[in-house]
């Protein structure tokens, strides 16, 4: 045995110099037909030639050696060794004793998988290697992993079902529903479903009598009843009636007949019942009714009828009673609707009895004090100009510019400040054959979901210019203004068809219009050279 271990341990260079290896090389290149008679009967010869063929000739790594097949045996002229040991695993285990177990080979012995203990041993060997505890099997061991671990044959024996295989190895330890994928037959077995349903009720602390009121579609999906629900048209009531025939009446369920929620009296009754049951104060109604709460109460059908909006439901039951700002949040893109923006301001003013004469006083400072949530909406949809929102919301009134402290240019167009008025009149007097129109076009910055309306857009000599006055840029009082101005500048500069000309507060410091005129000319705008304001 010591001699055999010597041949098992010598290095490749020594192995290659042995006389027997030289004879093997001659056979490999066809110089000699066969090895001497009786070569394969000697144990040391088997070790020498198998090691040389696999380790030196083929250069196989340790983990590759047990994966060899008969094609490699034939190619390396090792038939004599295989004939002696009858199988590749036995041959490899002789040459490399104690190095490999049956798990390392591509094939296991005949009838190996018939013994469930062998299956369990192999599975637990992999579990130890991967650090998986027995109780974690349902969550971490799935079909694909068992195939990767070479346990495909046992899987086939148990209908390709990880649960059936594991249940055979560990009887009664796990349930079907512990596994990520439930067996196909599970959805058709009412006994299994009933047991799992009752288990769900126990975990949720729901009595069977209350199941019709408290078990929702979301709860069933959470407890992996989604496949079963599909067989019952996604209806919790149909599923429960199937599992517990005769136990529940049709009136027991939240599921209502088609068209039920189109009747406002049904909507009012459901909402008022819920308010009474929970003891909700009148002023807390908008904050109480959220999408999550309605779903928990099994009122998904009501939500669907009102576009998934609790706000629409509350307004239908209490028309005009609550403002949009009293709710926790408005739906996505709610303010993109002109109708919603108008209704919000009209309701706001009606509740506070704001007269027509007082409407022009609703400016940024006013809302900053009373309802700051409106400010971001006006910034986004009215380019921070509150008078536009007011005029749009009250078309029945005829407002004059002076009421909003707006200024009128020499051509009759409105300006928001004295600086804008000055710039506007200057442009009117100095542009050559150019029509000057204020705030004529809207741009949408989808990155920040903002709408920009430039102060002026000038069309001259087949070119388009955006002229924007940033009057409060850099002001410590209006940090948000400067941040939005930077976003505007970045956006306008990205427009290929327009050239941005930004006028800053410092451009007014120099007497006259020299700085502004120079800014316009340097960007390619043609001015009236006779204009006295420029010099």
Image (cartoon, rainbow, N blue to C red):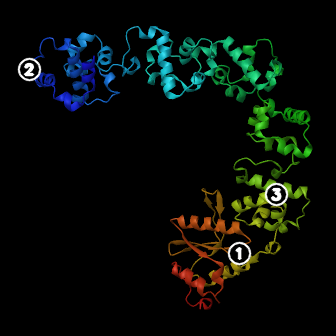
Judge by depth and name the residue closer to the eye, 66 or 313. Answer: 66
What's the distance in space between the residues labelled 1 and 3, CA to CA? 26 Å
Check disc 1 and report its element: helix, strand or loop: loop
Contact between labelled residues 3 and 2, with CB atoms less than 8 Å apart: no
Image x and y of residue 397, in percent: 84, 64
What's the distance in space between the residues labelled 2 and 3, CA to CA? 103 Å
Q: Quadrant of the N terminus?
A: top left
Residue 292 figure quarter: top right
For the point 24% across and 30% down, which residue is it?
11
The residue that disc 2 covers is: 32
| Residue ranking furthest to the left | 31
Judge by depth and name the residue closer to the eye, 167 or 27. Answer: 27
Residue 45 figure quarter: top left
Check disc 3 and report its element: helix, strand or loop: helix
| Nearer-N-terminus badge (2/3) | 2
| Nearer-N-terminus badge (2/1) | 2
* Left-right relation of 287 to 436: right
What's the distance in space between the residues labelled 2 and 1, CA to CA? 108 Å
Q: Which mark is residue 300?
A: none
Is residue 315 in view? no
For the point 60% across and 83% down, which residue is it?
516
Image x and y of residue 257, in percent: 78, 25
The residue that disc 3 covers is: 345
Check disc 2 and report its element: helix, strand or loop: loop
Image x and y of residue 79, in percent: 21, 15
Judge by depth and name the residue closer to the eye, 134 or 48. Answer: 48
| Residue ranking furthest to the front | 2
The residue that disc 1 covers is: 413
């Amino acid at each position: 045995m010591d001699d055999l271990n010597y041949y098992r341990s010598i290095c490749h260079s020594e192995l290659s110099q042995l006389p027997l290896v030289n004879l093997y090389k001659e056979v490999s290149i066809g110089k000699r037909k066969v090895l001497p008679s009786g070569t394969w009967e000697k144990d040391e010869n088997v070790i020498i030639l198998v090691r040389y063929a696999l380790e030196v000739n083929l250069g196989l790594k340790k983990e590759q050696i047990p994966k060899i097949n008969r094609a490699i045996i034939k190619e390396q002229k090792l038939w004599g060794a295989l004939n002696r040991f009858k199988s590749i695993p036995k041959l490899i285990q002789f040459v490399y004793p104690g190095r490999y177990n049956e798990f390392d080979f591509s094939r296991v012995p005949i009838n190996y998988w018939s013994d469930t203990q062998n299956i369990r041993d192999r599975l637990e060997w992999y579990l130890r290697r991967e650090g998986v505890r027995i109780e974690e099997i349902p969550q971490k061991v799935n079909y694909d992993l068992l195939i990767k671990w070479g346990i495909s044959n046992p899987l086939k024996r148990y209908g390709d079902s990880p649960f059936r295989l594991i249940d055979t190895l560990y009887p009664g330890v796990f349930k079907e529903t512990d596994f990520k994928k439930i067996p196909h037959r599970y959805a058709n077995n009412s006994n299994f479903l009933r047991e799992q349903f009752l288990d769900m009720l126990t975990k949720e602390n729901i009595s069977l009598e209350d199941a019709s009121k408290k078990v929702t579609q979301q709860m069933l999906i959470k407890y992996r009843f989604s496949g079963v629900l599909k067989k019952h048209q996604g209806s919790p009531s149909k599923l429960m009636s199937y599992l517990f025939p005769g136990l529940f009446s049709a009136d027991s369920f939240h599921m209502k007949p088609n068209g039920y929620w189109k009747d406002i009296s049904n909507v009012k009754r459901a909402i008022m019942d819920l308010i009474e049951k929970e003891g909700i104060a009148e002023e807390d109604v908008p904050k109480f009714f959220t999408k999550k709460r309605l779903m928990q109460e099994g009122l998904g059908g009501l939500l669907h009828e009102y576009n998934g909006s609790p706000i629409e439901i509350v307004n239908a039951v209490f028309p005009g009673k609550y403002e949009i700002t009293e709710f926790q949040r408005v739906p996505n893109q709610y303010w993109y609707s002109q109708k919603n923006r108008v209704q919000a301001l009209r309701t706001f003013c009606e509740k506070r009895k704001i007269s027509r004469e007082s409407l022009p006083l609703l400016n940024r400072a006013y809302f900053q004090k009373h309802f700051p949530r409106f400010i971001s909406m006006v910034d986004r949809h009215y380019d921070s100009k509150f008078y536009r929102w007011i005029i749009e919301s009250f078309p029945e009134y005829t407002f004059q510019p002076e009421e909003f402290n707006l200024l009128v240019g020499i051509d009759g167009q409105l300006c928001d400040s004295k600086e804008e008025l000055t710039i506007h009149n200057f442009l009117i007097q100095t542009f050559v054959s150019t029509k000057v129109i204020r705030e004529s076009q809207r741009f949408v910055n989808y990155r920040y979901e903002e709408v920009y309306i430039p102060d002026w857009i000038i069309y001259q000599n087949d070119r388009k210019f955006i002229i924007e006055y940033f009057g409060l840029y850099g002001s410590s009082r209006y940090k948000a203004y400067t941040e939005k101005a930077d976003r505007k500048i970045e956006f306008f500069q990205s427009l290929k068809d327009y050239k941005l000309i930004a006028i800053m507060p410092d451009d007014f410091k120099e007497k006259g219009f020299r700085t502004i005129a120079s800014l316009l000319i340097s960007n390619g705008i043609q001015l009236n050279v006779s204009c006295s304001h420029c010099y």
